[in-house]
């Protein structure tokens, strides 16, 4: 799939999918490698869905992602990775259908992922940050203030976990700033506005002028 993403040649992705599906088909249920194989297959299917838009690929990706989670024990080092991938796929389906159950399942999967011990894992702060985004999304649908408060807690935790120089510090700051701004708009608390401005400013300062994401930080 990485060759496809670099070159855009659909043949690479189809070959990866065929190989991934064959590997799963040849691996009996309960085999120690089956969870990782299903995780890889879910990735390939998710990529094809993003490029072709076939809902059947998304459904198959979610099914593979769910099996990957089910086959990975709570103490396994890959469980957080598998949960986060499943959460991302469920969030994609929520974006397609608007089904609140998918958003709830997204939050449950990502929350479990970030609650698992991940000492020093470079992706952990980003996972925590996106938990905050998903909670904010649910607040915007339901108006439950507890979700927005939890989104800001997660956003601040993500920032605290990203030292200066971390690849996603600007992203974490930007996402935190957005949540703080939403709360200011709902409560009028000036402290939230000031904190949102500070977070947004740091996000801009950390993003090079040539980076395409700079526009989002300035917005």
Image: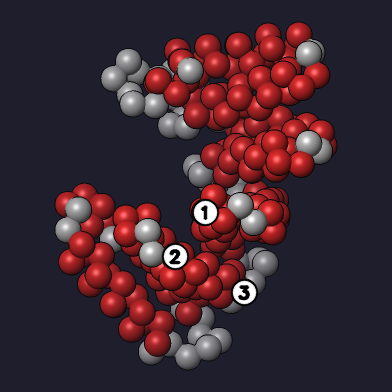
Residue at the image point whose x is 20% and y is 62% from the top: 10
Which percent across, then down, holds residue 38? Answer: 46, 73
Mark 1 secondary-structure assignment: helix
Left or right: where 110 falls relative to 32: right
Dots 2 and 1: beta carbons under 8 Å?
yes
In this view, 142 is above or below 8:
above
Which percent across, then down, holds residue 137? Answer: 65, 40
Q: Nearer the viewer, mark 3 or mark 2?
A: 2
Residue at the image point whose x is 41% and y is 82% from the top: 24
Which is more N-terminal, label 2 or label 3? 2
**As rendered, which of 83 and 191 lies closer to the eye?**
191
Q: Quadrant of residue 200?
A: top right
Mark 2 secondary-structure assignment: helix
**As rendered, which of 92 and 130 lies closer to the eye?**
92
Q: How far apart are the two marked residues, 2 and 1, measured between alpha carbons?
A: 9 Å
Which percent across, then down, holds residue 5? Answer: 26, 52
Q: How far apart are the two marked residues, 3 and 2, measured between alpha carbons?
A: 23 Å
Q: Identify the mark at residue 96; answer none if there is no mark.
A: 1
Mark 3 secondary-structure assignment: helix
Which is more N-terminal, label 1 or label 2? 2
The crowd level at tag 2 (other Cα within 10 Å; few <14, some 14-19, many 20+) is some
The crowd level at tag 1 (other Cα within 10 Å; few <14, some 14-19, many 20+) is few
Q: Which residue is mark 2?
A: 55
Q: Which residue is mark 3?
A: 70
Q: How far apart are the two marked residues, 1 and 3, measured between alpha carbons?
A: 25 Å
Residue 151 in sight here: yes
Which percent across, then down, holds residue 25? Answer: 40, 87
Which is more N-terminal, label 3 or label 1? 3
């Amino acid at each position: 799939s990485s060759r496809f993403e670099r070159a855009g040649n659909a043949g690479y992705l189809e070959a990866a999918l065929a190989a991934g599906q064959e590997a799963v088909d040849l691996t009996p249920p309960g085999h120690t490698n089956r969870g990782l194989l299903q995780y890889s297959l879910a990735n390939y299917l998710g990529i094809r869905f993003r490029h072709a838009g076939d809902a059947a690929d998304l459904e198959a990706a979610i099914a593979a992602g769910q099996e990957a989670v089910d086959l990975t024990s709570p103490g396994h080092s890959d469980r957080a990775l598998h949960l986060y991938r499943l959460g991302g796929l469920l969030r994609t389906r929520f974006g397609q259908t608007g089904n609140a159950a998918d958003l709830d399942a997204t939050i449950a999967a990502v929350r479990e992922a970030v609650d698992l011990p991940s000492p020093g894992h470079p992706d952990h702060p980003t996972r925590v940050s996106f938990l905050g985004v998903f909670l904010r999304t649910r607040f915007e649908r339901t108006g439950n203030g507890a979700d927005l408060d939890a989104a800001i807690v997660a956003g601040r935790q993500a920032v605290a976990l990203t030292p200066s120089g971390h690849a996603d510090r600007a992203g974490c700051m930007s996402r935190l700033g957005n949540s703080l701004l939403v709360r200011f708009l709902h409560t009028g608390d000036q402290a939230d506005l000031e904190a949102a401005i500070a977070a947004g400013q740091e996000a801009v300062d950390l993003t090079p002028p040539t980076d395409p994401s700079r526009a989002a930080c300035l917005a």
